[in-house]
Image (spheres, helix red, strand yellow):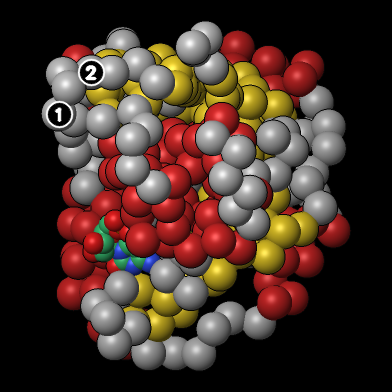
Amino acid sequence: MPLATLTVNAPAKLNLYLKVTGRRPDGYHALDSLFHAIGLYDRVELSDGVASDGKNPVSFTCSDPELAGEDNLVVTAAHKMLERAGGGRTVRIHLEKAIPAGAGLGGGSSDAAAVLTGLNRLWDLGMSTVELCELAAEIGSDVPFFIYGGAAKVTGRGEVVTPVEALTDTWCVLVYPGVRVSTAEVFRRFAGEKPGKMLTQAADASIITPVRGGTPNQPAAENDLQGTACHMEREIALAISALRAAGGEGARMSGSGASVFCLAPSQEAANGIRNRLETMPSWSVWVIPLVRH
Ligand code: C5P
């Protein structure tokens, strides 16, 4: 039988703003955030029917050996799809990483979503977007967004995804300052530092307006987790300051960090900021468009 293979590009995301609106009974935080896909991609290669060791139906390799363990979310996603597909199937997954891990860019979540959508196609399972999102939410809070991609307002603990129009002709200067921060630890410390902010109602949807209707770097476009993460890793604060000094107005953190970014209305404008940026040796810098997929 010929092998069926499929390669899926898994984009990174930015949080154009991120508000923590409350604390949920399940221990998670309620969020109100605007997610946007950017043109920085991991590559997920799926090969159907490649028997691995005869016992494990999922074999997995990764370009980054540190991420090649069975605890990678792509393996979790594949097992969930195997349960749906019924017995007898096997899959080989190879993951080529370009998105830094633990960086607030959703790389691991995007990879998992790529496995869900990819295996749905490869195995012709006919699962709906809503069904895929349900499985995605079981894997991680950021995974449902990547079933849609593009731009979306995201609420709940991350699983309530409302697609919105993607920004066009918008670029970002993205800095990964070379330090990893644990999402769980950032939320834990945030809750300790700002107990008064907990248990408020979800922010008004109009908060989206300054981001989409005005210039992209409006002051309203903030990240509630930024102060906490900057206290944990000074490099994050340094990278934000460096971007601002280079003309990156409204530079801010994505997700729970450690990546920071500013938006620019053209590639030329973004390149100008990048050229003025004083970087540290441990930092990685990209000029990348915001994308629909
Ligand atoms: O869902 P995910 O596994 O990505 O979340 C990692 C951790 O981040 C959770 O265990 C939780 O401690 C924290 N978190 C949170 N509220 C969210 C998302 C994540 O408190 N909305």
Quarter of the view holding residue 32: bottom right
Quarter of the view holding residue 50: top left
**Picture coordinates of residue 258, whole percent (x, y):** 34, 39
Of 73 and 130, nearer the camera is 130
Task: Examine the rendering and report whether any part of residue 228 can be seen.
Answer: no
Residue at image position (60%, 53%) is 127
- The C terminus - image quarter: top right
For mark 1, give the secondary structure: loop
Q: Read off the residue under disc 1.
A: 55
**Residue 5: which disc?**
none
Asked whether the residues under the numbered discs 1 and 2 touch, taking CB atoms below 8 Å apart as contact, a structural biologist would say: yes
Q: Tag 1: residue type?
A: Lys
**Picture coordinates of residue 117, whole percent (x, y):** 56, 40
Residue at image position (74%, 76%) is 206
Q: How many labels were placed on the picture?
A: 2
Q: Is residue 262 above or below residue 144?
A: above
Give the distance between the C-alpha atoms of the residues marked 1 and 2, in whole angstroms.
7 Å
Q: Is residue 68 above or below residue 234?
A: above
Residue at image position (60%, 38%) is 124
Q: Is residue 54 above or below residue 291?
A: above
**Picture coordinates of residue 287, whole percent (x, y):** 62, 20
Q: Read off the residue under disc 2.
A: 52
Give the crowd class for mark 2: few <14, some 14-19, many >=20 residues within 10 Å. Answer: some
Ligand 1 within 8 Å of the CB at mark 2: no
For mark 2, give the secondary structure: loop
Q: Which residue reaches farthest front?
A: 1
Give the crowd class for mark 1: few <14, some 14-19, many >=20 residues within 10 Å. Answer: few
**Picture coordinates of residue 167, whole percent (x, y):** 79, 44
Of 209 and 135, nearer the camera is 135
Q: Is residue 274 left or right of residue 69?
A: right
Q: Quadrant of ligand 1?
A: bottom left
